[in-house]
C-alpha cells in the first residue's frame, strides 16, 4: 500500500506564509486551500504540508500550540537534486524573510543546510548521493 503524508503546521499569517513558500517554488492544491488552511504540495500524490491558521490548528488538538520561535517540536527535511539547489532554496528562504537555521555541512555523501520559516518552523534541506553513502549510516 502506498501512503501519503500530510504534515500539519500552525501559522500566524496564512497569506504571508503562502507567499513565503511560493517564493521557494512550492505550489498549493487549491482543492484543499481556503482562508483557514493551505495545502502545500511537496511531492505530487505523496507529500503535503497543511499550513493551518493557528485557531483552526487548535481545533484538532488538546495541547497548547508550541511557539516554534522558542522551542522545536518537529524538524522537516526536504531532499534536493543537487548541492546547488540546497543553497538556492536556503537563499530564497532568507530573501523571503526566513533565516538560516544552521551552517551548511558537507558529509561527503550528503550535503545539508537549513532555514527557519516565518513561524519559526525548522526546515533542513539536503542532497544525498546514495552511491557514495557508507554501507551503514
Image (spheres, helix red, strand yellow):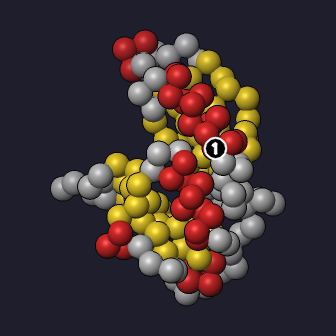
In the displayed structure, does residue 131 sit left or right of residue 3?
Answer: right
Label 1 neighbour load within 10 Å: few <14, some 14-19, many 20+: many
Query: Residue 108, image x and y in percent?
Result: 55, 13
Query: Residue 90, image x and y in percent?
Result: 62, 36
Relative to residue 108, is residue 43 depicted above or below? below
Q: Can residue 6 be seen from the camera position used here?
A: no
Pick the quarter of the image with the N terminus: bottom left
Query: Could you say which is closer to the camera, residue 136 or residue 119?
Result: 119
Q: How many numbered circles does the render carry? A: 1
Residue shown at 46%/69% (left/top)? 38
Locate residue 104: give its quadrant: top right
Relative to residue 32, is residue 27 depicted above or below? above
Locate residue 57: give its quadrant: bottom right
Query: Residue 118, image x and y in percent?
Result: 69, 57
Q: Can residue 56 be seen from the camera position used here?
A: yes
Query: Could you say which is closer to the camera, residue 118 or residue 64?
Result: 118
Query: Residue 116, image x and y in percent?
Result: 69, 49
Relative to residue 127, is residue 4 depicted above or below? below
Helix, strand, or loop for circle 1?
A: helix
Q: Which residue is mark 1?
A: 93
In the displayed structure, does residue 43 sit left or right of residue 79?
Answer: left
Query: Could you say which is closer to the camera, residue 129 or residue 42?
Result: 42
**Residue at the farthest left position:** 1
Residue shown at 75%/67% (left/top)? 67
Residue shown at 59%/18% (left/top)? 107
Residue shown at 78%/59% (left/top)? 69
Amino acid at each position: 500500500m502506498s501512503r501519503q503524508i500530510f504534515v500539519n503546521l500552525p501559522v500566524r499569517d496564512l497569506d504571508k506564509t503562502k507567499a513565503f513558500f511560493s517564493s521557494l517554488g512550492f505550489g498549493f492544491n487549491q482543492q484543499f486551500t481556503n482562508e483557514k488552511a493551505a495545502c502545500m504540495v511537496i511531492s505530487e500524490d505523496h507529500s503535503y504540508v497543511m499550513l493551518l491558521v493557528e485557531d483552526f490548528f487548535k481545533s484538532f488538538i488538546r495541547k497548547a500550540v508550541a511557539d516554534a520561535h522558542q522551542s522545536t517540536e518537529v524538524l522537516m527535511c526536504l531532499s534536493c537534486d543537487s548541492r546547488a539547489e540546497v543553497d538556492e532554496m536556503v537563499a530564497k528562504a532568507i530573501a523571503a524573510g526566513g533565516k538560516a537555521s544552521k551552517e551548511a555541512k558537507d558529509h561527503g555523501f550528503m550535503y545539508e543546510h537549513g532555514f527557519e520559516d516565518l513561524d519559526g518552523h525548522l526546515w533542513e534541506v539536503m542532497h544525498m548521493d546514495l552511491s557514495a553513502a557508507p554501507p551503514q549510516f
